[in-house]
Image (cartoon, helix red, strand yellow):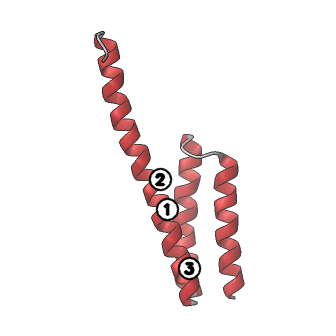
Amino acid sequence: MANHKSALKRVRQTKVRTERNRQRKTTIKTLRKETLAAVEAGDKKAATESLSKFSSAVDKAAKKGLIHKNKAANLKSRTAKAIAAVG
């Protein structure tokens, strides 16, 4: 365990950041599932609205360094491609 005051603070900060990152990743996964569920149902309008929210969340995560920018682009591309297939 950490002994120095600064090390104890770093432990606290890491806990907070880890929880925040976990929450953001969970949000991204949930939004993607919602979008793909709308695609499965054949509801293109709901899927495009959900894609907008999903893309925004993914872009923010990539900007913060939570996920790599190429992964963000990949996720958005695959999801958009699934929506285009419904049309």
Residue that label 2 marks: 25
Q: Say whether residue 81 is left or right of residue 2.
A: right
Give the mark toward the camera: 1 or 3.
Answer: 1
Residue at mark 3 to residue at mark 2: CA–CA distance:
20 Å
> Which residue is found at the position 50% from the left and 71% from the top?
33
Residue at label 1?
Answer: 29
Q: Which residue is mark 3?
A: 47
Q: Residue at x 58, y 90 (%)?
A: 42
Please identify the quarter of the rendering in which residue 10 is found: top left
Cβ atoms at labels 1 and 3 below 8 Å apart: no
First in sequence, mark 1 or 3: give its number. Answer: 1
Report x, y in % for residue 68: 64, 45
Q: Please say if the residues under marks 2 and 1 sit with CB atoms less than 8 Å apart.
A: yes
Q: Residues within 10 Å of mark 2 (few under 14, many from 20)?
A: some
Q: Residue at x 57, y 71 (%)?
A: 51
Place of residue 86 in the rendered image (x, y in percent of width and height, measured from the top left) = 67, 87
Instruction: Specify the amino acid type for callout 1.
Output: Lys
Amino acid type, callout 3: Ala
